[in-house]
């Protein structure tokens, strides 16, 4: 008669959960911290990052969300200096005191305007 083997799943489960904590945070992507109110949220939280790739006319900006979502933006003559790159949802922006607010769909982003050089 062969004895059944008993495997414990606890060590495997612990390894799987530990792997969830090793993924890099949004801060590792560099860029500038941006307050955002995503999905129609009423309050802003400093959870998003604006990351620039390229320079000049080839510059592209990615607004990174903490859940892995993102918006791709390009330089434009707007109050934020940015516009949507794909046109699926139109970006609008405005200045509110010393802040810039960019709105795309149900998402809003707020950051300090760049210092005049």
Image (tube, helix red, strand yellow):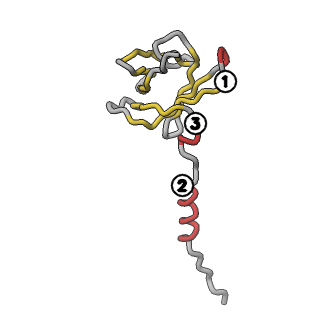
Q: Residues within 10 Å of mark 2 (few under 14, many from 20)?
A: few
Q: Secondary structure at mark 2?
A: loop
Q: Residues within 10 Å of mark 3 (few under 14, many from 20)?
A: few
State the residue position of label 2: 21
Residue 110's quadrant in the figure?
top left
Q: Tell me which numbered mark, 3 or 1, is placed earlier along the sequence.
A: 3
* Residue 10, horizontal then vertical, whole percent: 53, 71
Which residue in the rendered view is the most extreme toward the left?
A: 42
State the residue position of label 1: 54
Residue 9's quadrant in the figure?
bottom right
Residue at 37%, 32% (x, y): give it: 44
Give residue 30's mark.
3
Left or right placement of residue 83 versus residue 44 in this view: right
Q: Secondary structure at mark 1?
A: loop
Question: Are dots 3 and 1 in contact, CB under 8 Å?
Answer: no
Q: Secondary structure at mark 3?
A: loop
Left or right placement of residue 112 versus residue 59 in this view: left
Residue at 53%, 29% (x, y): give it: 50
Q: Nearer the viewer, mark 1 or mark 2?
A: 1
Q: Nearer the viewer, mark 3 or mark 2?
A: 3
In the depicted structure, whether residue 11 falls above or below residue 6: above
Q: Tell me which numbered mark, 3 or 2, is placed earlier along the sequence.
A: 2
In the depicted structure, whether residue 14 falls above or below residue 3: above
| Nearest to the observer: residue 64 or residue 1 | 64
* Residue 11, horizontal then vertical, whole percent: 57, 70
In the depicted structure, whether residue 20 falls above or below residue 89: below
């Amino acid at each position: 008669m062969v004895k059944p083997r008993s495997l414990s799943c606890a060590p495997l489960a612990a390894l799987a959960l530990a792997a969830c904590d090793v993924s890099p945070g949004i801060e590792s992507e560099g860029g500038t911290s941006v307050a955002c109110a995503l999905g129609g949220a009423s309050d802003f939280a400093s959870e998003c990052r604006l990351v620039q790739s390229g320079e000049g006319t080839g510059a592209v900006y990615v607004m990174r969300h903490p859940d892995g979502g993102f918006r791709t933006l390009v330089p434009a003559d707007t109050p934020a200096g940015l516009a949507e790159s794909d046109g699926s949802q139109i970006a609008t922006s405005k200045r509110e005191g010393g802040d810039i607010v960019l709105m795309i769909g149900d998402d809003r982003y707020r950051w300090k305007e760049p210092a005049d050089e």
